[in-house]
């Protein structure tokens, strides 16, 4: 490819609405263009990286024995009604009508369509196990599309689905996909972790997310510093502290805390650390139960753990009116002493003594309070968000915390969709049984964006070789100099015929601006043709993101480049 007639609209400045590095750099490098919120065109350079990730995904899926197919984006409501998701899915599902007024959606995921295909085509256990995948555009009407391709509304996903006769064989299909995902993200050159994830409302028994470690990640994850336990904080368990609580010394006394409502305000006012306070949260479930949830003052509630424990889908904090009904005081002063609703507490609260709680009276708190002695707790449960320094639930190690970008997700679905849609096969005994399913997603665009989050500097992207849009950039210092042009073209052609994806910067621009563009778009190796080096029979070679510029004899350069590309591809 020659840059003179390549569509490469690089920008000097980052567009104002781009917050994170990958979004800024993909726009600046001319990889993508925004069409509407969360909807982008992939320009030629961006598409090359996208296609590379797709190719890696395809190869690893094929190797894992999955077959590629392609399903439509537009799916009739009927199928989604069969699974019950037409009603459940909410506003992320973009619904539309055709000219005959038939309802459709732009499918955000394809369990319904794939299950429909399989129920009509697979009849016997002999055809199993079977895995199918596609790489296709998805639409999700995200509330907050942001960060460019990271959280788009229209985006490219690889989605795969496995079908098995029973749980044991479904577990094997799941493990195969898990390993394929490890290969994929390794080959993409990413620093990632597979973490245990909550299975959420889709149901299903087990799920792992593949997280690219990056400060800008939307997910919080923890991992053990001594074993391989790693989990999304949504799900992460915390080792129980079995220490005996210390002996209580104080007695309950009320103190005035005028206008101090938050944990921080009360702790400051009483000159106590926040961990001496108990946070009392009054919550209400979607089934109408109201209860008090207690946590150590400096801890955060994990709503997912709470919902799991309560067996509900959602909880919310009760409104002001209910706070007054339950406590007799305005909000900010609730505490467990004398409360009549059910009280549950995080495990940690069991070990607290002489602590501070709201007094259920305006502008008042109680000090010297002990759980068990001064109020009853119905049940102690793991309810808090895991943090760095918490004990690992599997071993004696400690948890470390990270931010992560979820690039992939593997999920054991069980029989949810096969039962709902009647996808059964005849088993060995000739009996009809529902298929056991798994589903497996990878965000293709998000993977490219995540790679950029992990690999960039002030000057631009530093692409891992495997997903770089081009492998080698040949820059002509002076595109009017005949010798430069002819030697440069020769190198460029040699590289192309050796299977290297080379790009030739033959533009008439100043060298400085060419170098800026080369750094910005992140081609892993740059060869400069011209100047003093060429007079000495050499090229100047530089590896992006490290390494000195080196002079290399013209005759040796092509061979060296081919080897260096191979070396970097091998990781
Ligand atoms: P998230 O929690 O980020 O919304 P999700 O749990 O909704 O993700 P899945 O339904 O598991 O995502 O989708 C599979 C993969 O598709 C994700 O792992 C992610 O890489 C990608 N993906 C999901 N939503 C988006 C989006 N809005 N933009 C780009 N990629 C996405
Ligand atoms: Mg989502």
Image (cartoon, grey):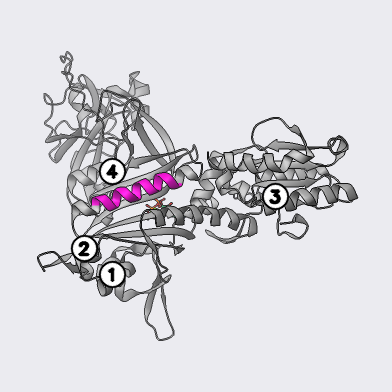
N-term-proximal mark, 4 vs 3: 4
Mark 3: secondary structure: helix
N-term-proximal mark, 1 vs 4: 1
Nearest to the observer: residue 366 or residue 15 = 15
User: Which disc number belongs to residue 118?
Assistant: 1
N-term-proximal mark, 2 vs 1: 1
Pointer 3: what residue?
A: 495
Q: Is residue 363 left or right of residue 404?
A: left
Circle 2/circle 3 CB separation < 8 Å:
no
Decide whether the magenta segment is chiefly helix, strand or loop. helix
On whether ligand 1 comes within 8 Å of the CB at mark 1, the answer is no
Mark 4: secondary structure: helix
N-term-proximal mark, 2 vs 3: 2
Distance between the Cα atoms at labels 3 and 1?
46 Å
Q: Is residue 348 above or below residue 119?
A: above
On whether ligand 1 comes within 8 Å of the CB at mark 2, the answer is no
Pointer 4: what residue?
A: 303
Give the quadrant of the N terminus: bottom right
Mark 2: secondary structure: loop
């Amino acid at each position: 490819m020659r840059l003179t007639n390549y569509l490469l609209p690089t920008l000097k400045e980052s567009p104002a609405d781009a917050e994170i590095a990958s979004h800024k750099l993909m726009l600046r490098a001319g990889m993508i263009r925004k069409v509407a919120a969360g909807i982008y065109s992939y320009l030629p350079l961006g598409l090359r990286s996208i296609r590379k990730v797709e190719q890696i995904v395809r190869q690893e899926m094929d190797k894992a024995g999955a077959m590629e197919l392609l399903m439509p984006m537009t799916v009739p409501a009927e199928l989604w009604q069969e699974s019950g998701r037409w009603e459940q899915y909410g506003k992320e599902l973009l619904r539309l009508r055709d000219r005959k007024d038939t309802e459709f959606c732009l499918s955000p995921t394809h369990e319904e369509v794939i299950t429909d295909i399989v129920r009509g085509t697979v009849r016997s256990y002999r055809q199993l196990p079977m895995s199918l995948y596609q790489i296709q555009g998805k639409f999700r009407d995200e509330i907050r599309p942001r960060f460019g391709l990271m959280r788009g509304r229209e985006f490219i996903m690889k989605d795969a689905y496995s079908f098995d006769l029973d749980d044991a064989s479904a577990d094997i299909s799941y493990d195969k996909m898990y390993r394929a995902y490890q290969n994929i993200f390794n080959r993409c050159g990413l620093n990632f972790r597979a973490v245990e994830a909550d299975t959420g409302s889709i149901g299903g028994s087990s799920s792992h997310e593949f997280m690219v470690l990056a400060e800008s990640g939307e997910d919080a994850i923890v991992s053990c510093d001594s074993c391989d336990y790693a989990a999304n904080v949504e799900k992460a368990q915390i080792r129980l502290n079995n220490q005996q609580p210390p002996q209580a010394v104080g007695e309950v006394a009320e103190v005035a805390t005028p206008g101090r409502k938050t944990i921080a305000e009360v702790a400051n006012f009483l000159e106590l650390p926040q961990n001496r306070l108990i946070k009392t949260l009054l919550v209400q479930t979607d089934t109408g139960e109201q209860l008090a949830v207690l946590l150590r003052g400096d801890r955060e509630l994990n709503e997912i753990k709470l919902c799991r424990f309560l067996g509900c889908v959602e909880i919310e904090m009760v409104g002001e009116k209910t706070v007054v009904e339950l406590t007799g005081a305005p909000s900010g002063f609730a505490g467990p002493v004398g409360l009549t609703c059910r009280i549950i507490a995080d495990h940690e609260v069991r070990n607290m003594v002489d602590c501070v709680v709201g007094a259920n009276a305006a502008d008042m708190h109680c000090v010297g309070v002990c759980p068990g002695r001064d109020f009853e707790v119905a049940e102690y449960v793991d309810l808090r968000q895991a943090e760095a320094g918490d004990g690992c639930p599997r071993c004696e190690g400690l948890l470390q915390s990270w931010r992560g970008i979820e690039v992939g997700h593997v999920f054991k679905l069980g029989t949810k969709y096969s039962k709902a849609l009647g996808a059964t096969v005849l088993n060995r005994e000739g009996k009809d049984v529902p298929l056991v399913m798994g589903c497996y997603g990878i965000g293709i665009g998000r993977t490219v964006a995540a790679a950029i989050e992990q690999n960039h500097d002030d000057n631009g992207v530093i692409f891992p070789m495997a997903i770089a849009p081009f492998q080698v950039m040949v820059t002509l210092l002076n595109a009017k100099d005949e010798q430069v042009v002819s030697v440069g073209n020769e190198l460029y052609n040699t590289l192309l015929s050796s299977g290297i994806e080379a790009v030739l910067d033959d533009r008439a621009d100043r060298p400085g601006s060419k170098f800026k563009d080369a750094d910005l778009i992140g081609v892993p190796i740059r060869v400069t043709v011209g100047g003093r080096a060429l007079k000495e029979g050499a090229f100047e070679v530089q590896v992006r993101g490290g390494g000195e510029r080196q002079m290399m004899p013209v005759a040796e350069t092509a061979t060296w480049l081919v080897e260096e590309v191979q070396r970097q591809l091998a990781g």
